Image (tube, rainbow, N blue to C red):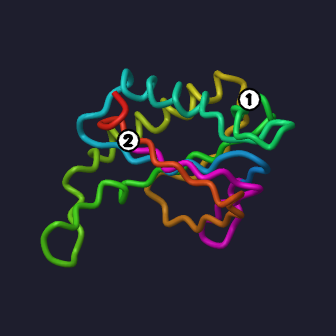
């Protein structure tokens, strides 16, 4: 499982020219799910995500987690995080999770993050989405379950 976490001032998700969700201060999280991922891996990734201390405290140190600043999250499914570009110029996506299973795991992640009293906005699984954001910092972190656990 891969999460690309961007600390943002605000963000929005548009589908077919319509704004379907938006957030203020918080994270936009692009979520890549592989065929090998499951709820146990998701739980560990969610814990890491929620406990990241990348917001500034009163001394300007990145020492606060999202819940300490009342931040929000936009969770976006992003199978292209599993693009394999080793051969040729056209990416292969065979490492990405099968759509039905990946969608179930994506919905599980949304539910679990919400259960931690964090406001969550989403896109639509499999849709052509246009994500607009103002990256704060910029501050972007890549979390990969194969490297963390």
94 shown above or below 91: above
The quarter in which the N terminus is drawn is top left
48 shown above or below 81: above
Magenta segment's dominant SS is strand
128 vs 73, nearest the viewer:
73
Residue name at image x 43 percent, y 56 percent: 126
Figure quadrant of residue 129: bottom right
Q: N-terminal of the two: label 1 or label 2?
A: 1
Say whether residue 116 is magenta: no
What is the residue that sits farthest to the bottom in this orientation? 89
Residue name at image x 60 percent, y 33 percent: 52
- Mark 2, residue position: 144
Residue 67 disc label: 1
Badge 2: residue crowd in 10 Å (few <14, some 14–19, many ≥20): some
Highlighted range, magenta: 1-21
Residue name at image x 36 percent, y 59 percent: 80
The percent position of residue 26, horizontal first and vertical second, equals 72, 45
Q: Secondary structure at mark 2?
A: strand
Figure quadrant of residue 90: bottom left
51 vs 18, nearest the viewer:
51
Q: Secondary structure at mark 1?
A: helix
What is the residue that sits farthest to the right in this orientation? 58
**Left or right, residue 71 beside residue 145:** right
Residue 116 disc label: none
The percent position of residue 61, horizontal first and vertical second, equals 74, 40
Residue name at image x 30 percent, y 33 percent: 37
The percent position of residue 17, horizontal first and vertical second, equals 66, 73
Alpha carbon separation for disc pair 1 and 2: 22 Å
The percent position of residue 103, horizontal first and vertical second, equals 41, 41
């Amino acid at each position: 499982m891969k999460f690309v976490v961007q600390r943002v001032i605000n963000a929005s998700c548009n589908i077919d020219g319509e704004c379907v969700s938006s957030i203020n201060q918080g994270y936009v999280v692009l979520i890549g799910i592989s065929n090998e991922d499951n709820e146990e891996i998701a739980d560990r990734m969610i814990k890491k995500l929620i406990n990241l201390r990348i917001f500034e405290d009163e001394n300007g140190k990145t020492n606060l987690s999202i819940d300490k600043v009342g931040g929000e999250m936009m969770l976006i499914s992003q199978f292209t995080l599993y693009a394999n570009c080793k051969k040729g110029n056209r990416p292969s996506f065979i490492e990405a999770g099968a759509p039905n299973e990946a969608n179930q795991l994506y919905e599980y992640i949304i539910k679990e993050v919400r259960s931690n009293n964090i406001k969550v906005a989403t896109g639509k699984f499999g849709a052509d989405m246009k994500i607009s954001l103002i990256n704060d910092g910029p501050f972007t972190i890549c979390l990969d379950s194969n490297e963390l656990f």
